[in-house]
Amino acid sequence: MTIPGGDKRVTLADVAKLAGVSKQTVSRVVNGSAHVTEDTRERVLHCIETLGFRPSALARQLSTGRSQTIGVVSNGGQGYLVTGVAYLGMVRQADRMGYALLIKEMVDFSAGSVRAMLDFLIERQVDGVIWAGPEIGDSHAWLDDFDLASLPMPLVAINAKARPGVDTVSFDNFEAGRLATRHLLSLGRRNIGHISGPANRWVTQQRVEGWRAALAEAGLPEAGRNLVEGDWDVTSGGPGLRRLREICPQLDAVFVGSDRMAIGVLAEAHRLGLRVPEDIAVMGVDNQPESAFLIPPLTSMTQDTPRMAEVALRLLVRRICERRGEPYPEACAIPESPVLYHDLVVRASTLCSKSPTR
């Protein structure tokens, strides 16, 4: 905004001159300080309105040490929360609580790169950090021995394994693997293979452990060898099914680590003349929108990533408020569980009118 009749931006000094007070007094009014008389406050506010003054966010940040900005770090384009519905939901939730998001990507997880990223965020005075990428290999290894208390802002990690002293918000992927396998077992399937995601992913490892645990509970620990590694992509589904049938010719069910890979499994089953689900039951994970329209419709498991994004954001804002000794915004006043669960969505790819042939 400019001074009426002028061509320059209205400054703190302009308001101070018109109100007959110091710039420090105007700053106190703008920042809501109690150390100003009511008459002075009203006079300054009147001058602010008259001149159309808009406080500088940068100046407020310098004076208060608060940017009202949250840093969101993703893993080289593989972040759970930086695209699509989850991201939009997080943006809206942040906006309702008065925060903006600063998105950054990591492609190298060496100690030096992590330190450089944290320094970058510290220099921009972000109020908190969401480490949003999936745990791939050693991408989160720095959390094992890093002193998070040394950071001037709190940090929440997404879909990472639990670590002492680290706030995490994650799906229970062990329980997801067990839930999927128990579903297939409940249908009378006994030779249940698993096409996993990449083996270096913590999510993959947890689902494999859950799958094996359910088999062991059912007295079928030997079936835990029926494992093939995929890469989440549709192209690894067909080869994965062929390899499983080589390992286990009696294969009668496949728990697939993603709906995309499951699409490849369905296509390969059709090519091989296998009936789904009569000859082989197939289920995936993610519950992609197209999964309900496959032939047959695919049984899957929903993981609510928009909810994960919002839970992580609300937890982080709680931590920010705790550090400042301030009350929580209404949106995050009630603590939430940082562990989220998948929902089973049963469709025709696992259900049939008669039991499979043994």
Image (tube, rainbow, N blue to C red):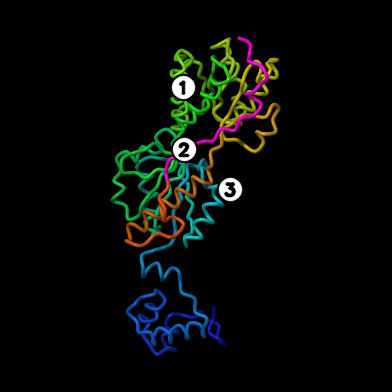
| Identity of the residue drawn at 60% across and 28% down | 261
- Give amino acid for label 2: Phe
Count of marks overlaid on the render:
3
Q: Circle 1: is it few (<14), some (14-19), or many (20+) Cα within 10 Å?
A: many
Q: Nearer the viewer, mark 1 or mark 3?
A: 1
| Up-down relation of residue 338 to residue 21 (above or below) | above
| SS for dot 3 | helix
The percent position of residue 293, horizontal first and vertical second, equals 70, 33
Q: Disc 2 marks which residue?
A: 171
Residue bearing the label numbered 3: 85
Q: Position of residue 22 (x, y in %)?
A: 36, 85
* Residue type for callout 3: Val
User: Disc 1 vs disc 2: which is toward the camera?
Assistant: 1
Q: Mark 2 or mark 3, which has the lower sequence index?
A: 3
Instruction: Check whether the beta carbons of the residues at disc 1 and disc 3 lie within 8 A of each other.
Output: no
Mark 1 touching mark 2, by CB under 8 A?
Answer: no
Instruction: Identify the residue under disc 1.
Output: 214
Pick the residue in front: 155 or 115.
155
**Label 1 amino acid?**
Ala
Q: Residue at x 47, y 45 (%)?
A: 74
Could you tell me residue 237's position as x and y percent? 60, 24
Query: Which percent across, then down, holds residue 23?
Result: 38, 82
Is residue 123 covered in magenta? no
Measure the alpha-carbon separation of dots 1 and 3.
Answer: 32 Å
Q: Which residues are magenta?
A: 337-358
